[in-house]
Amino acid sequence: MIREIHIFKDGQTLFQDVIVPNKDLDTSAVMMLVSSSAKKLQEWKIDSMEIERYRYVYMNSHGTQFILTMDRQASLQKVTEAMMDLVSKFMTVFENALETNEWKSTDFSPFGVGFRKIVAKIPVKMCLAGHGGTGKTTLLELATLPSRGPPQEYIPTFFGDKALLKADFDPYIFSMFDLGGQDRFVQEWGKIIRSGSLVVIVTDSTKDNLSWTKRVAYPVLRAELPYARAISIANKQDLKGALSPDEVGKKLGVPAYGMQANQRNFRDRWLKLLRALAFEEIDFTIVGEIVEVD
């Protein structure tokens, strides 16, 4: 997912829009480094650099530096295509101003609407990972098919399901992947989850299921999505003997949030959790940094 855009000319900021701020690094220092590299590029050439869990995609055109900050885990190809689209639209409106001193007094803020429309064209990939029967499909349908209501019986997912989700996530749209949780499918997750920015680890809040998650699911997630943001769902909280969200979170090493996915009145809570994860408004863990507790 694209998080920020910065546009510079002669060391001055022409335009910036921060959708999800970078809270880990000194943005000013990073922008100075990246814009310096961008200035050296040939016209319309695109390059990128990676710093921790972020990737910076940049271009130089008409002496102007364009920098997109994205999740390192997201699709570089799609963001590169978005950069070309973005710069083309920017030049259509402001090229004449950039070729004269007029740019120093030009208001570039109207470009914000166009920028967010471009961001909205790239769905944010979210993966629901967990063992079979923990409620992944139910959560997918709870989010995307509220009029039908969540299923009340378990039907195994074959390999994986996908659905687009539009809600209060502007400018983002989510592409949600429900990964088949049967043991024979887990080793195939890598074919589906590449470029995923967000991971929701779904459990049924039992000790056996947490053990399976750490033993079987974690190695695949670490190998394929080391920079993705993750939370866990302590599902089936209504069942006798269910571990509390705090217990689930401590054992998994990932913040856990309680849920009863087969109850329609949990839909608002579920959508708020998804939004808060995308905008980094709740506690989460980077997959490659998960520390488990026995």
Image (tube, grey):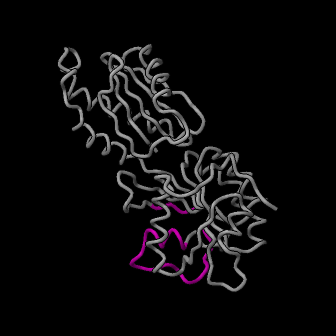
The residue shown at (61%, 44%) is 227
Q: Is residue 9 left or right of residue 175?
A: left
Report if residue 149 lies within the magenta region: yes
Residue 83 location in percent, x, y? 38, 32
Q: Is residue 209 left or right of residue 282?
A: right
Q: Is residue 7 left or right of residue 266?
A: left
- Between 275 and 194, the one nearer to me in the picture: 275
In the picture, which quadrant includes the C terminus? bottom right
The residue shown at (39%, 45%) is 19
Residue 174 location in percent, x, y? 44, 56
Say if 222 sits above or below 129 in the image.
above
- Between 37 and 162, the one nearer to me in the picture: 37
**Res 13 → quadrant:** top left
Residue 87 location in percent, x, y? 32, 29
Report if residue 153 lies within the magenta region: yes
Residue 128 location in percent, x, y? 58, 61
Say if 181 sits above or below 155 in the image.
above
Q: Which residues are magenta?
A: 138-163
**Res 92 → quadrant:** top left
Q: Is residue 115 left or right of residue 204?
A: left
